[in-house]
Structure formats: C-alpha cells, structure tokens
Amino acid sequence: MNMNQIVQPLLQWFEQNKRDLPWRHNCTPYRVWVSEIMLQQTRVEAVKGYFSHFLQAAPDIPALAALPEEKLLKLWEGLGYYSRARNLQKAAKQIMEQYGGNMPAVYEQLLTLPGIGSYTAGAVASIAFGLPVPAVDGNVLRVWMRLTADHADIADLRTKRQTEAALQPLMPAEHSGAFNQALMELGAMVCVPNAAPKCSSCPLAEFCEAHRQGTELQFPVKKPKPPRRVEQRTILLLEQEGRLALRRRPPKGLLASLWELPGFGGALTQEQAVEAVRSLGLEPVRLKPLPPAKHIFTHIEWHMTGWRVWLAPLPEAQKLTWADADELRAGYPLPSAFRPFLREFLQAEK
DNA sequence: AACTCGGGGCT
DNA sequence: AGCCCAGAGTT
C-alpha cells in the first residue's frame, strides 16, 4: 500500500471536521508552544480552561520568563505534571538569552529546549513554522499502527522513531502543520482508544489494513504498566484563628515546590495525631476525625485519613505558613489531592 | 529499558 | 477498576 494516498483525503477531512480550539486562532509560535506543553498527556477539554488564562498572565516570552515561580505554579494549579510549567519558564529564559526572545524556527534547536521532546518539537516546527516534520503522539501511533496493522509495542521508543521515519516522506510541504493535526484529530475523534473506532466515518478506512482484517481492536499493542503502590497518609487540618496551616513541599519529586496540608505517613490514631501535632511545635485543644479520601496518581495511590485540629494559641511553628480562606485561594498553589480536606475548612469558614 | 511525574474522563 | 490522554526527563 502506497501511503501517499492517505494525505489528500486526510487533509480534506480535517479541513471539514476540525474542532474550533483557542490555540488554533492567532497561531503564533508562542501560543502553539504553550498549548502543546499543556496538551502533553492532557485532554483538550482540560486545557481549554487554562490556556487563555495563562496567556493573559504571560502574554509573551519575556513575560513568561519574568513570572515569579509562585504565580507560575498557581496558573498551572490542577493541570498536573508541574515540571512542565517549570521547564516552560526555563525554556523561556533560555530563548531570551540565546535567541533574543524569539522561538527558534529549527527542529533541532527546539529539541534542545527543556520540556520539548520529539513530539513537541515536531508540533511547533510544523504548526507554527510550516516545517515538514512529523509530530508523533499517542493518537498518531494508534492511527498508524491500525493503518498498517503493526503489532509493535508503542511503549517502545523505537516504535515511535520508526513511525516518524515512515511519516517523514508523506509530509506535504505546504500543509505539514495541518497534516500532523489531522492525524491527531482523527485519533481523537474517529480512531478512538478503548472503544470501537468509528470506521464508518473514517476518511482512511479504505487504506486501513486493520480495518480490512477486521482487527482494529487489536491495535495498538502496548506493554502493561506495573501496578501502583499504595501509600497510607494522615492529613492534618490545623486551624488557628480562622487560618489554616500550610507547608511547602520539597523542590524535587512528587508535586515539587507546591504547598500541602501537613501530613504524616501511616494511619494515625487520635493519640498519635496529638503527638504529630506536638512534633510541629503546636498544642491541640480538640481533634475531630475527617472522612477518608483517596487520590490516584499515575504510579501511587494516596489513601488518606485526616484530623481536624483546633489549636491553643501559641507562637507560630517553624516550617508552617498560615493562610485564611482568601489567601489560600489567591496565593498558594495546592494540588488537587487535598481538595476533599480543604472543603472541610472552607465550608467551616462560612 | 524502566521509573517518575497529575489529574480527569470514559468504558 | 482499568485505560489513556496533542510526553519528557531521569536513572
């Protein structure tokens, strides 16, 4: 099968069926870049709510480079994979120094920027600069493996390289950005995962080997992920004069540099919780158990229990910061994992 | 090659 | 209860 045949039908289908997305208007290199970083492992619907707000706060590369880290993380709060935000800013600073504040229009130079790998470099190069470079993400891999009935493991990096190599000669010189987006759009809307693909409305059905075989659901092949580990934690809702205790997480690792409710490993009894509070230099007056909550990360499960703690007025404890409801909402980037316990405090404020 | 890194929606 | 998502960086 000569895969050159798919290019025109695909481009035509995309022109007629593409979604109206914020980053598809005024596609400057900066806007394309920010959207592609936000879209890494993140659904379009989730990004919509962040994109315009982020661009308002950081409208261009100099503004992004100058943003205080606290504001940067607050803008990213709830979006996940927070190293994306830090790498985005690190790259912005690098662009200021090395390229005079302009995104480099060269694939290899884009690749050297932190947070930009082969997919994102290809996406920015093709969509923002019209360069004939493939952009192979999970959607494209799924589409291509079905199209060619290829049983290769898509978790294997070699499979991605081979797919890029196979797509390279197909890149239409004047429409490379549209071609890449069309493959992704097809994967998102028609050649969908975890469900029967909508082959009856697929512009590539007649070229698809898996469809000819009736084996669409066998693709793509992917190695199973190892099971998540479970971590039991106890969260403390420490209150003093209407203010809540917060703690900054370490600068590396899970939820790096974000704020958290003070917590301890294990499921603490009331007596142990009292000891834990005292270890923070505070004196509890009354404790009330909070309903348990579960938060699932990619590779960890937090099983959390909590204690709401009223404190005797005492000099402030080291390593803790105190915030009222308004300061909490405005100032401190806080991961979603703590939302159930936070609700308890915010409701109590009313 | 295997792990780390978030959060949410769909089946 | 899994699966996957416009992946990249580290070990």
Image: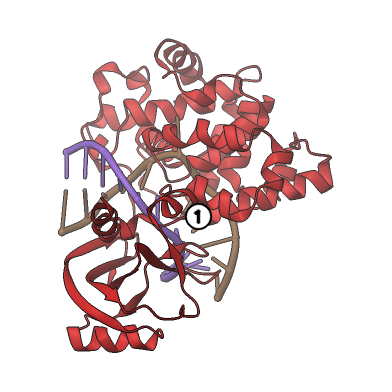
Chain colours: A red, B purple, C brown
Instruction: Measuring from the top left, give residue A271's x and y in whole percent.
Output: 20, 88
State the image quarter where residue A186 is shown.
top left
The three-letter code of the residue at mark 1 reads Tyr
Instruction: Measuring from the top left, give residue A226's x and y in whole percent.
Output: 31, 66
Residue under pointer 1: A82
State the image quarter where residue A236 is shown.
bottom left
Which residue sits at x=32%, y=19%? A202
Which residue sits at x=59%, y=45%? A118
Which residue sits at x=23%, y=58%? A344
Mark 1 belongs to which subunit?
A: A
Is residue A77 among what the camera can see?
yes
**Between A59 and A236, which is closer to the camera in this rendering?**
A236
Reply above or below: A174 against A153.
Answer: above
Is residue A166 among what the camera can see?
no
**Between A79 and A271, which is closer to the camera in this rendering?**
A271
Instruction: Measuring from the top left, give residue A303's x and y in whole percent.
Output: 23, 69
Q: Is residue A164 left or right of residue A94?
A: left
State the image quarter where residue A272 is shown.
bottom left
Q: Residues within 10 Å of mark 1 (few under 14, many from 20)?
A: many
**Between A154 and A43, which is closer to the camera in this rendering?**
A43
Query: Which secondary structure lies at badge 1?
Result: loop
Instruction: Measuring from the top left, give residue A86's x and y in whole percent.
Output: 60, 54
Reply above or below: A341 against A165.
Answer: below
Which residue sits at x=68%, y=34%? A60
Reply above or below: A126 against A348.
Answer: above
Q: Quadrant of the N terminus of chain A?
A: top left
Q: Is residue A174 left or right of residue A285?
A: right
